[in-house]
Amino acid sequence: MELTNANSVDSLLQPGYTASKTIGEGTAYSDPIRKIVVSVDFVELVDGSTWGPDEYKSSERLAGQRAGAHQAIEHLKNMLSRNGPLAVVQSIEEGLREIVPPTGHSLEWLNGFDGGVGTIRERLRAAYSKGGADVIESELRRPFDASDRR
């Protein structure tokens, strides 16, 4: 199962366009692959409506991912205003362990939450390594994904 989330409006698949994706790159099998079945289980449209049976509970994963990212961003924005950019850098280096998901959600949602927090952590780590502490604030103002533009 592969869940792809567009990072920005520019990366959304537009009507009439196509996209390709490599799945399982580097995976080796002892027997040759004789058949590949690809199916689309869940699609979220620009207006927030969804399509598909969602048998793999991607909508829950996506909701958790967004909740985790937004909680991480808010936490780090508060930390930035109280303690400055170096405190934010220290927190991301320590793994953002202080960000705890709320209770009462499915395993899929919780996995998504952890993924959202991890995405923000990695985004900030990469930005810091390229631009130093000066880029922390602007990076925290960036939308998490294309849904933040709705």
Image: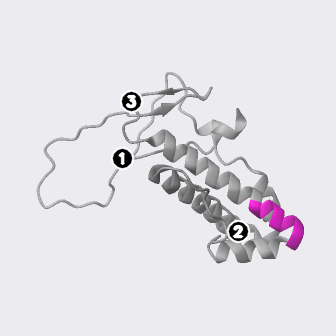
Please indicate whether residue 95 sits to the left or right of residue 90 in the image.
left
Q: Identity of the amino acid at label 2?
A: Lys
Is disc 3 surrounded by few (<14), some (14 to 19) or many (20+) residues within 10 Å?
few
Percent of width and height locating residue 58 = 46, 42
Percent of width and height locating residue 24 = 32, 54
The residue depicted at 24 percent of the width and 38 percent of the height is 37
The circle drawn on residue 49 is none
Q: How many marks?
A: 3
Which quadrant holds residue 90?
bottom right
Percent of width and height locating residue 66 = 61, 48
Vertical placement of residue 83 versus 13, above or below: below
The circle drawn on residue 53 is 3
Q: Identity of the amino acid at label 3?
A: Pro
Alpha carbon separation for disc pair 3 and 2 = 41 Å
Q: Which of marks 3 and 1 is in front?
A: 3
Say whether marks 3 and 2 touch (CB < 8 Å).
Answer: no
The residue depicted at 18 percent of the width and 59 percent of the height is 29
The question of residue 77 being in magenta is answered with yes
Vertical placement of residue 82 versus 58, above or below: below
Q: In which quarter of the image is the C terminus?
A: top right
Comes first in the chain, label 3 or label 1: 1
Q: Which of marks 1 and 2 is in front?
A: 1
Q: Identity of the amino acid at label 1?
A: Met
**Residue assigned mark 1:** 1
Comes first in the chain, label 3 or label 2: 3
**Residue assigned mark 2:** 130
Q: Could you say which is closer to the camera, residue 99 or residue 10?
A: 99
Q: Could you say which is closer to the camera, residue 91 or residue 108?
A: 108
Please indicate whether residue 48 sits to the left or right of residue 137 in the image.
left
Please indicate whether residue 36 sits to the left or right of residue 133 in the image.
left
Which quadrant holds residue 98?
bottom right
Q: Give the range drawn in magenta.
A: 75-83
